[in-house]
Image (cartoon, helix red, strand yellow):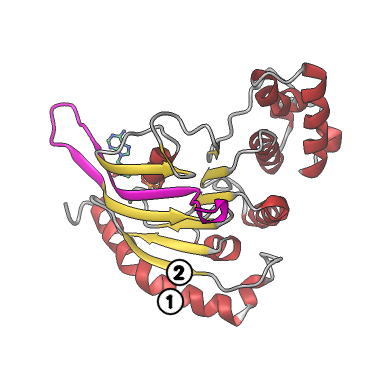
Amino acid sequence: MTMEAVRAVSLKQMAISFEMAGKARFDAVAATNLEVGAHEFVAIVGPTGCGKSTLLNATAGLLTPASGTVEVFGQPLKSINKQAGYLFQQDSLMPWKTVLENVAIGLEIAGTDRAEARRIARDWLGRVGLATFADRFPRMLSGGQRKRVGLAQVLIRNPKLLLMDEPFGPLDAQTRLIMGDLLLKLWSEDRKAVMFVTHDLDEAIALADRVVIMSAGPKSRIIGDFKVALERPRDIGEIRHDPVFNRLHRDIWQALRDEVMTAYRQSSGEIA
Ligand SMILES: Nc1ncnc2c1ncn2[C@@H]1O[C@H](COP(=O)(O)OP(=O)(O)OP(=O)(O)O)[C@@H](O)[C@H]1O
């Protein structure tokens, strides 16, 4: 098998359940198959509580499947996924460290000499547009600037796979667009495999090569898998006016709408 053919992620009949103290087991995700190519950007969309984070956490090695397997670059995942960089909705910046120190720390922990780690961190701060912010502390940054630091913090370690869980969730709409463009610019340099969880369908289509749709839980499943036939490079503000974008949006929304309504009725107590 050539390296090109090796998938970054293969979920094979993978199901996730949670043991609930004193209650019946909760089957969050039913047996699921999903493949992510080594250079593919896959967005995962679904109604609230359907299991998007659960799928990502299993791929990160933070959750053990109840059945089935997770393979990462052709190898079964047995513990924490060391090939993955993880970006959450909440950033994980250390408030007592400067921006530069926060970006450099991953390399330092991995054994890179401190001066070298900081040199590389400075370079990354330039790439995320924060060259002049190196000596600030996280509390002195805006939400968007913190996200930029978070991106640099993950990318400096050069993971082959990025797991992103609503990374731009807390940001305002304009800042989300700017962050999306920055992410695509950095991604296009070496096209790492990406699994990007979002509830925002526009964002999913604008960024991804494929959009995967999950059904409302419990026993959530993948109910749609749409290829995004939009050229790159993309300007994610502009691309929303492209007729291909609009057709795809309509098709995906048709698949998603019923699931969103089911999840809404569940959370409002209308159905168990
Ligand atoms: N540790 C846990 N114990 C029990 N149930 C859990 C646990 N973690 C998640 N769940 C349940 O599993 C289901 C899927 O949760 P998950 O966080 O993966 O959904 P999500 O699609 O990421 O949601 P959102 O879009 O709201 O962030 C939910 O019903 C949630 O309540």
- Label disc, if present, on residue 10 of the rendered structure: none
- Name the N-terminal-most of marks 2 and 1: 2
- Label disc, if present, on residue 226 of the rendered structure: 2
Q: Which residue lies furthest to the right in this view?
A: 132
Give the residue at x 41% y 43%. 71
Q: In which quarter of the image is residue 123?
A: top right
The correct choice, above or below, for 54 with respect to 96 in the image is below
Residue 29 visible to an observer of this rendering: yes
Horizontal arrangement in the rendering, residue 4 relative to residue 264 (left or right): right
- Label disc, if present, on residue 251 of the rendered structure: 1
The correct choice, above or below, for 252 with respect to 69 in the image is below
Query: Which contiguous range is marked in magenta?
Result: 1-28
Residue 49 visible to an observer of this rendering: no
Horizontal arrangement in the rendering, residue 181 relative to residue 61 (left or right): right
Q: Are marks 2 and 1 in contact (CB under 8 Å)?
A: yes
Give the residue at x 19% y 56%. 270
Percent position (x, y) of residue 263?
A: 29, 56
Q: How many residues crowd mark 2 within 10 Å: few (<14), some (14–19), many (20+)?
A: some
Q: What residue type is labelled 1?
A: Asp
Percent position (x, y) of residue 89?
A: 53, 41
Give the residue at x 63% y 36%. 154
Q: How many residues crowd mark 1 within 10 Å: few (<14), some (14–19), many (20+)?
A: few
Q: What residue type is labelled 2?
A: Phe
Magenta stretch holds residue 10? yes
